[in-house]
Image (spheres, rainbow, N blue to C red):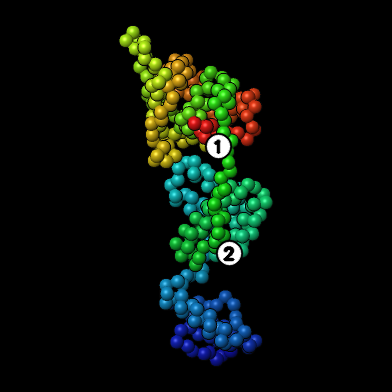
Amino acid sequence: MPAAKGVKRRFGAVRQYRSGRWAASYLDPAGLRRHAAETFPTKTDAEVWLSQIEADLTRGDWTDPDAGAVNFEEYALRWVEERNLAPTSDELYRRLLRLHVLPTFHSVDLDEITSGRVRGWRAERLEATGATTVAKSYRLLKAIMETATDDELIRRNPCRIKGAGKEEAEERPIADVEQVDAVAEAMGPRWRLMVYFAAYGSLRPEEQAELRRSDVTLPDEPDELKRRRDISREPVLLRIVRASPELTTGRRATGDPKSRAGRRVVVLPGFLTVDVRRHLDWFAAKEEDGLLFVGERGAPFRRSTFGRKWRKARAEVGLPEGFRFYDLRHTG
C-alpha cells in the first residue's frame, strides 16, 4: 500500500510506497488523473518523468497513453476502406495485408508496434519472399502508421528503416523484332495483334481489353488517285481512354487508365495497317462500338485463358520462361 504521505509539486505528484519505490501521476488536459505505467526506484526518477510529460504538454507533443490501444488489423482494414482506392489498388493493399502484414501484426495494438518489431518483421519477410513484395508491404505499413500518427494515436511512426520502401527495379529482358514476329505468329491470328500493340505501342493488357472499334483510326484505303502513294507510311492511331483490369475474382474493373497520362493517342507504324484491318474484319466484335479483342464466343478475353496461350507461345519460340507479356512494352 502507498504511504499516507504525498509530495506536492507545481506539476503532477509523486508518492512513495512502503517498498521504497516511487509513483508519479498528473492531470491530463481533460482533467483526468494519469498514472505512470511503472514505479521508479528514486524520487528523482519519478520527477524527471513528470518533467518530460510537462514538456510534452507545453510543446503540444503529448498523446493520450490509451489512444494507441487500437487493434492494428481493425485500423488497417478501416484505413484501406476509407481511401476510396481504385479496384486494383484496393485488391493489392488487401492482399499485401493478408499475406505479409497481418500474420505478424493482426493481434497487436498500434502503440505496441515498435521500430524493433518492424525491423524483425521485415527481416523475416525478406527471408520468405521477394524484395519487391517486401518493399511494397513496408510502404503500406508505413503509410498506415503515418496516418495513425496524424490521428494522434501514436507519437511517432515506428517505420524508420532508411530505403526499406524502395524497389530495386531489375533489368527486364527485351525481345528483338524477329522474336516479336515469332511470338505473334505463335499466338495465332486472333491474338497476334495484341503482341504488336504491346511491342510497338507499349499498351498494357488492361488497356487492350477495353479497346473498341471507335478507338482505331486507319489510313484511307488506296483508290485510283492514290495508287502511287505508299499507304504503309501513314500511321495507325489508337485512342486510349479506358482500361479494364481483371481482378483476381474474375471481375473487370473498367475505368480510366492507370494515370492521367494514360489517356493518350498511340501512334503505331503503318506496316500494321493490313493486320489491323484484317483483325477488324475477322475477329473484333461486330457492333459499331464493339470490343477489339474478344474470344471465339464473342466474350471479353480472360486473363487466365490469354495467359495459357502466352506461355505456350513463349515456349514455342524459345523466349525465356521469365519473359512476361508486359516485357514486350520495352521493345518498341
In which quarter of the view is residue 116 placed?
bottom right
Write the residue at 57% across / 75% down: 37
Give the percent coordinates (x, y) of residue 111: 55, 65
Disc 2 marks which residue? 114
In the rendered structure, find residue 256 and report the number of the disc placed on it.
none
Three-letter amino acid code at the position of disc 2:
Thr
Q: Nearer the viewer, residue 328 or 159?
A: 328
| Extreme residue in the left direction | 225
Write the residue at 65% across / 86% down: 19
Write the residue at 39% across / 36% down: 263
Relative to 239, say whether 11 is above or below: below
Disc 1 marks which residue? 248
Q: Secondary structure at mark 1?
A: loop
Give the percent coordinates (x, y) of residue 219: 37, 19
Write the residue at 47% across / 63% down: 149
- Viewport quadrant of the N terminus: bottom right
Three-letter amino acid code at the position of disc 1:
Thr
Confirm whether residue 140 shows in the render: yes
